[in-house]
Amino acid sequence: AQTVTQSQPEMSVQEAETVTLSCTYDTSESDYYLFWYKQPPSRQMILVIRQEAYKQQNATENRFSVNFQKAAKSFSLKISDSQLGDAAMYFCAYRSEWNTGNQFYFGTGTSLTVIP
Amino acid sequence: DSGVTQTPKHLITATGQRVTLRCSPRSGDLSVYWYQQSLDQGLQFLIQYYNGEERAKGNILERFSAQQFPDLHSELNLSSLELGDSALYFCASSGEGDTQYFGPGTRLTVL
């Protein structure tokens, strides 16, 4: 089974600064999707960004961007100009393109604190 | 708003009881997933249904069961409840080759 590892249980960043959250995964597949989800104190799971493995270009959504290194099986999330509202738990997730179950695999999460 | 609805939002019950959680996926989504999230924990995948059929099973206890109905809504049944079953239960849905969207969750408290 695929595994997703987030090695940073907690991170902090000063407001307006940049922070990078790490994620690595293990797979033998060549086609798949990767996601970052945000879970603020409300506990709602919110999609932040997604990346298709066949695309070499890194995905970007406003202040959020990823650094996707397919060979290294790395998928880090960069948050620029951090805001207080970015404080949340961030989960990295993997989804197989060909997995008949279309199962998603989640990391254990990184808790991000934004310091005013 | 993700388009995924879950009811009820909160549920308080006693040990040994049985409860049913309900989920309606986004319009057009055939896949429904159930997750359990205990306090300060990550997401534990329980089970997935696709168009009424079970597709994948995770760490789901035998006391738990689920089904997906012809109208694609899904129910998660939890029986013989224990204190440790207290958690946030998420439902998510996805379409083919698409992203997983989460409902707001049902917070279950077992006393």
Image (cartoon, coloured by chain):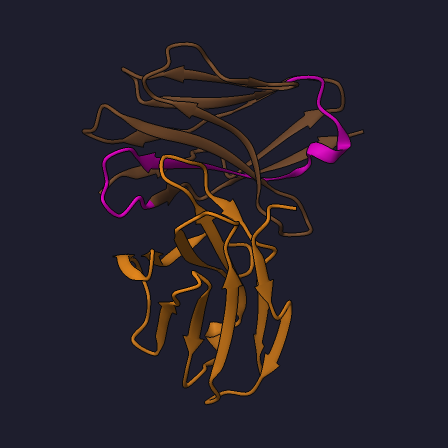
Does residue B14 appear left or right of residue B55 in this picture?
right
Nearest the viewer among A96 and A37 is A96
Name the foreground residue: A14 vs B43. B43
In the image, residue B46 above or below residue B92:
below
Which residue is rendered at x = 74% and y = 35% of the image?
A: A85
Residue B64 image position (x, y, % from top left) = 36, 74
Residue that extends furthest to the right in the rendered view of this protein: A116
- Decide if residue B74 is on the left or right side of residue B50: right
Task: Look at chain A in the picture and name its colour.
Answer: brown
Magenta stretch: residue A11 in it? Answer: no
Colour seen for chain B: orange
Give the residue displayed 41% in from the left and 86% down from the top: B80
Magenta run includes residue A93: yes
| Residue found at the very far top of the displayed protein | A57
Q: Position of residue B35 (x, y in %)?
A: 44, 57
Give the x, y percent position of residue B2. Answer: 60, 46
Q: Is residue B87 above or below residue A92?
A: below
For the record, the magenta segment spans: A80-103
Comparing A26 with B31, the one in front is B31
